[in-house]
Amino acid sequence: MAEEKKGVMLLDFWVSPFGQRARIALAEKGVEYEYSEQNLFEKSPLLLNSNPVHKKIPVLIHNGKTVCESLIIVEYIDEVWSDKAPLLPKDPYSRAQARFWADYIDKKIYECGTRLWKLKGEGQEVAKKDMIEIMTLLESELGDKTYFGGDVFGFVDVALVPFTSWFYSYEIVANLSIEKECPKLVAWGKRCMNRESVAKSLHDPAKVYEFILLLKKINGIE
Ligand SMILES: N[C@@H](CCC(=O)N[C@@H](CS)C(=O)NCC(=O)O)C(=O)O
């Protein structure tokens, strides 16, 4: 029988908001792991074998076993390293609510952001209106709380905060000011950046924008 490989490895791609969720959760828990940057334009056998269904990063490999899908990875990390920095609330109703908002973020932001940089004219205007609606709704869910988790940084914060490093790009491509539309949400993002786990997992918004320019070029968008 093959010997089980011990330890934690993360298959990731630097700019991915999904990968960054896993990185933040691991950092919150103080878990040491091997970071494996993947080439998404030429996928490695390791990535293809680890996530044969979706063939996407992030993939967490823990003692030789793979876990796919970022929110599932964050929940897994929270359960395995449960002694430190709990991310999901204990109370079943609060847990259900946290999962609801993380799921909302998952279904809405990346897709809408992609429409923002891919489309022009009316399509982009619709995406812009949608993005403002999404952000406004999230801002009202945040309310006057420090974090989405209340006083403690939690699951919804982990799900959303990676997108803050994409805000700058959304603003440039669509001539939009998220700060003007949702000042409390932007202030929350800055608060999160004061956490080491977040600051070391996100990238400079200008670099994210350079990546979007590359994506536009690859997709033949002027
Ligand atoms: N729902 C997935 C989304 C992951 C995802 O979209 N990953 C992208 C990078 S941001 C990827 O691996 N793309 C490669 C591809 O689509 O071929 C999650 O939450 O983990």
Image (cartoon, rainbow, N blue to C red):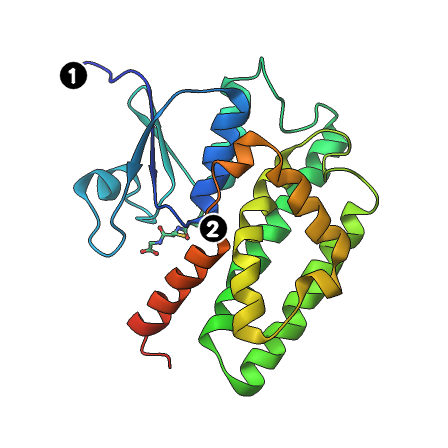
Residue in the picture at 69% in, 32% down:
95
Task: Say if 170 sits above or below 121 in the image.
Answer: above
Packing grade of label 2 (10 A; few <14, some 14-19, many >=20) is: few
Residue where numbered disc 2 is placed: 204
x and y, in percent, of residue 211 in the image? 38, 60
Is residue 193 among the parts visible in the rendering?
Answer: yes
Return the residue found at the far bottom.
Answer: 121
**Cα distance in 3D space between marks 1 and 2:** 42 Å
x and y, in percent, of residue 150 in the image? 77, 34
Q: Quadrant of the C terminus?
A: bottom left
Image quadrant where residue 28 sits: top right
Return the residue found at the far right.
Answer: 144
Q: Quadrant of the N terminus?
A: top left
| Amino acid identity at mark 1 | Ala
Residue where numbered disc 1 is placed: 2
Looking at the rendered structure, the secondary structure element under dot 1 is: loop
| Amino acid identity at mark 2 | Asp
Residue in the picture at 47% in, 50% down:
204
Is residue 100 among the parts visible in the rendering?
Answer: no
For residue 74, which numbered disc appears in the image? none
